[in-house]
Image (cartoon, rainbow, N blue to C red):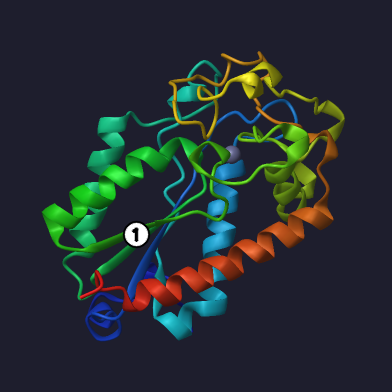
Amino acid sequence: MSRRLEDLSGPEVGERITDSSIIVLPIGAVEQHGPHLPLAVDHVIAHEAAAALVAEYGDAHDLWLLPTLSISKSNEHAWSPGTLWLSATTMLSVLDDIARSIATTAARRLVFLNGHGGNSALLNVACREIRLDHGLKTFLVHPFVPADHGGESPEAELGMGIHGGHQETSVFLHLRPDLVHLEKADRAVPAALADNAHVKFGGLTSFGWLSDDFFPEGHIGDPTTANAAEGKELFETAVRLLGEQMAEIATFDFGR
Ligand SMILES: [Zn+2]
């Protein structure tokens, strides 16, 4: 049985979608990821993680998959031709419109499953705006929490494998090995940042950045050590953790 919302007929939505349903919107990006990866990385990862999540945990938690929002807020890569991006205001409007549409169903829980770190701050804003404007319970989850938002990155990358680095490249080697060109990969870690006490990724002081502020290649991390076996493990762990999060989201009620 399909758990893609778009596979239902109009009348079936009224029967199958209830106030216990959780609507999952995968959000990716089409943006440069350095010379070794295609533009598609983030939306492929978001889509595959969401599809695996719904396949494994959909019946347990009444999950319903929306089509992946493949173009999002990628303006840190605007310098790179081929990157497709929405402005912050456009993206907020798109999310608000999708949420308004979901609010016409019986579902009351909307989950953003985000594969692109550049969206995270805006998606937190959207969660609150949609909560206020449409009354939905809103949640933001990541297959991989970005290192500049508290996520982990290998020590070898000095905690800065945030874009096209070891982990993301490993996961993509697992999902789409035909699209990875490791022979073109090089290490691009802005090592001097690690000497700062506060102004660094994940530090007390955050800072505005564009992906070509660091190196002209546009990735940030060290993909040269990437491997598919580790990518498989990372991906499967991510899906399991997403499943655990859905179990809590399913009953979440503000501690009342
Ligand atoms: Zn990415």
Tag 1 secondary structure: strand
Side (left or right) of 182 relative to 129 = right
Residue that sits furthest to the front in the current view: 197
User: Residue at the location (28% across, 82% down)?
Assistant: 12
Answer few, some or many: residues within 10 Å of disc 1's Cα (few below 14, many 20 plus, some between 14 and 19).
many
User: Residue at the location (77% across, 48% down)?
Assistant: 173
Q: Is residue 78 visible?
A: yes
Q: Is residue 176 above or below residue 248?
A: above
User: Residue at the location (64% across, 31% down)?
Assistant: 33
Q: Position of residue 140 (x, y in %)?
A: 39, 55
Side (left or right) of 134 relative to 202 = left
Q: Which residue is mark 1?
A: 139
Depth check, front residue: 252 or 194: 194
Residue that sits furthest to the right in the current view: 183
Question: Which picture quadrant has residue 220?
Answer: top right
Q: Is residue 40 visible?
A: no
Q: Quadrant of the C terminus?
A: bottom left
Q: Position of residue 164 (x, y in %)?
A: 67, 35
Question: Which picture quadrant has residue 91?
Answer: top left
- Image quadrant of ligand 1 equals top right
Q: Position of residue 93 (x, y in %)?
A: 23, 40
Depth check, front residue: 8 or 254: 254
Q: Position of residue 202 (x, y in %)?
A: 52, 35
Q: Amino acid at mark 1?
A: Phe
Q: Is residue 129 above or below residue 118?
A: below
Q: Is residue 228 above or below residue 24?
A: above
